[in-house]
Image (spheres, grey):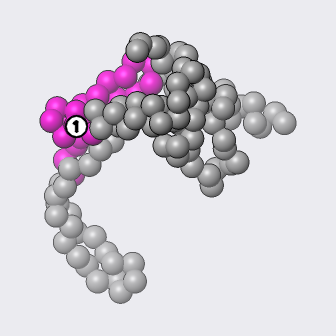
């Protein structure tokens, strides 16, 4: 089965504001409706995509999705931090973290939505 990302839009995503979050199930429901496949098949597609993203980040440390963004693994240096409850200084070890940088198309779409929201 093949399809393009442009076939999948956010029109069917159920969102009630900034405090709500899109879930895997909601994404699978949207994929299911757009591709005319069962929700179970769509869940498997979504899970396979997420697994591929995870595996690629672990092995290769970078995923570049044109017009969407870049996911990249970076190493954070060890540092001293402060426990906010006790005020004690603690040592934080170095660690690898995933960072996301938006692509121009995604950034533009988000900004356009923000501008439209302010007009209302």
Residue in front for this viewpoint, 66 or 59: 59
Q: Is residue 47 located in the magenta-colored stretch of the structure?
A: no
Say which of 77 and 63 sits in front.
63
* Residue appearing at x 28%, y 32% in the figure: 52
Q: Taking 89 as reference, is 14 left or right?
A: right
Q: Residue furthest bottom?
A: 86
Give the camera-side residue of 42 and 50: 42
**SS assignment at label 1:** helix
Q: In the visual, does 39 lie left or right of 57?
A: right
Q: Position of residue 3 (x, y in %)?
A: 46, 14
> Is residue 3 rendered to the left or right of residue 91?
right
Q: Position of residue 113 (x, y in %)?
A: 68, 31
The residue segment tinted magenta is 53-76
Q: Position of residue 119 (x, y in %)?
A: 81, 33
Residue sitting at x 22%, y 37%? 55
The quadrant holding residue 94 is: bottom left
x and y percent of residue 35 in the render? 54, 20
According to the image, label 1 marks what residue? 55
Quadrant occupied by the N terminus: top left
Check the image and report above or below for 15 versus 93.
above
Against 75, is 117 above or below? above
The question of residue 63 being in magenta is answered with: yes
Extreme residue in the right direction: 120
Q: Is residue 97 visible?
A: yes
Of residues 95 and 51, which is closer to you in this image? 51
Residue at x-position 30% and y-position 38%:
51
């Amino acid at each position: 089965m093949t399809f393009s990302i442009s076939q999948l839009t956010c029109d069917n995503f159920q969102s009630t504001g900034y405090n709500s979050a899109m879930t895997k199930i909601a994404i699978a429901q949207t994929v299911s409706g757009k591709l005319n496949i069962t929700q179970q098949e769509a869940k498997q597609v979504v899970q396979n995509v997420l697994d591929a993203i995870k595996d690629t980040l672990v092995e290769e440390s970078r995923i570049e999705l044109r017009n969407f963004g870049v996911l990249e693994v970076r190493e954070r240096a060890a540092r001293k931090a402060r426990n906010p409850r006790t005020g004690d200084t603690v040592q934080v070890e170095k660690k690898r973290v995933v960072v996301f940088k938006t692509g121009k198309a995604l950034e533009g779409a988000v900004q356009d939505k923000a501008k439209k929201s302010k007009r209302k």
